[in-house]
Amino acid sequence: MNIVVLCGGLSTERKISFSSGTKVCGALRAKGHAAVLVDLFLGLEDMEEDIINNPEKLFSNLPELKPVVFDGVAPDLDEVRKSRKYKSKSLFGRGVLEICSKADVVFIALHGLNGEDGRIQATFDLMGIPYTGSGHVGAAMGMDKIITKELVRPYGINTPNWNSYCGVTKEDIPQILNDNNLPVVVKTPTGGSSVGVYIVKTKEEFEEALNNALKYSNDILVEQFVVGKEFTNAVLKGKALPCVEIVPKEGGYDYNNKYVAGATTEICPGRLDKDLADEMGEMARRVHEILGLKTYSRSDFLVDKDNNIFFLEVNTLPGMTPTSLVPQEAAAVGISYEDLCEMIVEDALDRD
C-alpha cells in the first residue's frame, strides 16, 4: 500500500511526533509498504517542484529515513513557524493534502494539539481520506481532560475530584487559589506529554503553576492530588492489553522521563494482582467505549495504597516512539512492533 505517515505539526509534542512517525514509517516499509514520512506543517516545501506538483512520485522513490535523536527539550514553535518557506496561514504545509489524497491511507503519528484533537481527522473526513486512529469527535473529546472526566464519571469511572476554569486571566488567580485545598495538580486541559502539568503543595507553588499554565491555555484544570503508583493501560481493537507500571528513576513521569531512554523503569505487566489488573483493563476499555474511540487508545491511572484505581486521562493517538508504552503492551501478548503498525492500518481500512 501507499501510506503517508503524518507527523510533526505545531504542538509541544512536535519532536515526539517525529520520533513516533520515523519508527512507524520504518516498520511499515519493513512490511513491504511504500510509506512516506511527511511533516504536517512544513510539508514538501524542500522537495523539487516536480515532486510538489506530482507528490505521488514519492511512493515510487522513497526518501531516506533519518534517525531521530530526542534531546529532552520541548520545541520552540515560534522558530518552527519562522523556518517555514511556504508563507501561508494554513496548518497544512505545501503539498500535504495533495500527497495524503494520493495515499491508500494516512497513518496519523501526530500528538497533541492540531493532530490529536480532531481537526485533522475532520478535514480528512470531509475530503474522503482514510486515516488511522479515532474519528474527529472521539479525538476531540479525548483531547480535553475536562470533557473526558465529565463524560466518564457518570459511568462509574473513578477519577480524582477536580475544579475546571475556562477563559482564565491573571485576575482570576486569587479566586482559584481560594477555591482549592492543597495539594493539587494544575493541568492544561488539552496539553500532552506532561507539558503544562504541575504538582503543587504550597500556595506559592500553586500561584506559580497557574501563571505557567496560562502560557499554554486560558482553560485550567485543578485536580485533587492522589498519592499512588502510576500505571497505563492500552486498548487495541476493543480489548485491553496488559498494563504497564511506570517508575521514574528521579522525579515524576514528566516530558523528559517519558522520552529519554533509561530515565524511567517500565514494568509490563505491571505489578498488580489479577483482579486489580483486570479492573484497570476494564476501566480502560470502558473509557475507550464511552468516548467512541477507534482501533487503539491508552489510558493513564494511579493506584493508591488502598488499591483504589483513579483514571487520569486518555490518549487517542498514543506515542509510538522507541520508548513508548503501547508497543510494550502489545509485545507482552506477542504482537511485534511491525505487526502492531500494520494492524492499526488494516483496522482503519476495515471501517464502514
Image (tube, grey):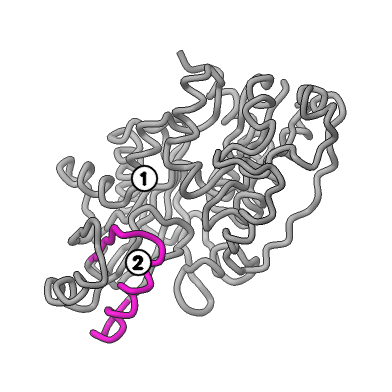
Q: What's the residue type where badge 1 is placed?
A: Gly
Vertical arrangement, residue 77 with respect to residue 338, above or below: below
Foreground residue, 48 or 230?
48
Residue at image location 24% in from the left, 62% down from the top:
168
Q: Which residues are magenta?
A: 200-223
Q: Is the C-beta separation of discs 2 and 1 under 8 Å?
A: no
**SS of the residue at dot 2?**
loop
**Mark 2 surroundings within 10 Å by alpha-carbon count, few (fewer than 14), some (14 through 19), many (20 or more):** some
Image coords of residue 175 (percent x, y): 14, 73
Residue at image location 81% in from the left, 37% down from the top:
47
Image coords of residue 173 (percent x, y): 21, 73
Residue at image location 85% in from the left, 24% down from the top:
60
Q: Is residue 153 left or right of residue 132?
A: left
Residue 210 magenta: yes
Q: What's the residue type where badge 2 is placed?
A: Leu
Image coords of residue 144 (percent x, y): 33, 48
Which numbered mark, 2 or 1, is in the foreground of this view?
A: 2
Vertical arrangement, residue 113 with respect to residue 207, above or below: above
Farthest-out residue, top:
352
Residue indicated by mark 1: 281
Res 284 → quadrant: top left
Q: Indicate which disc, 2 or 1, sits on the residue closer to the N terminus.
A: 2
Residue at image location 53% in from the left, 76% down from the top:
249
Q: Quadrant of the C terminus?
A: top left
Residue indicated by mark 2: 214
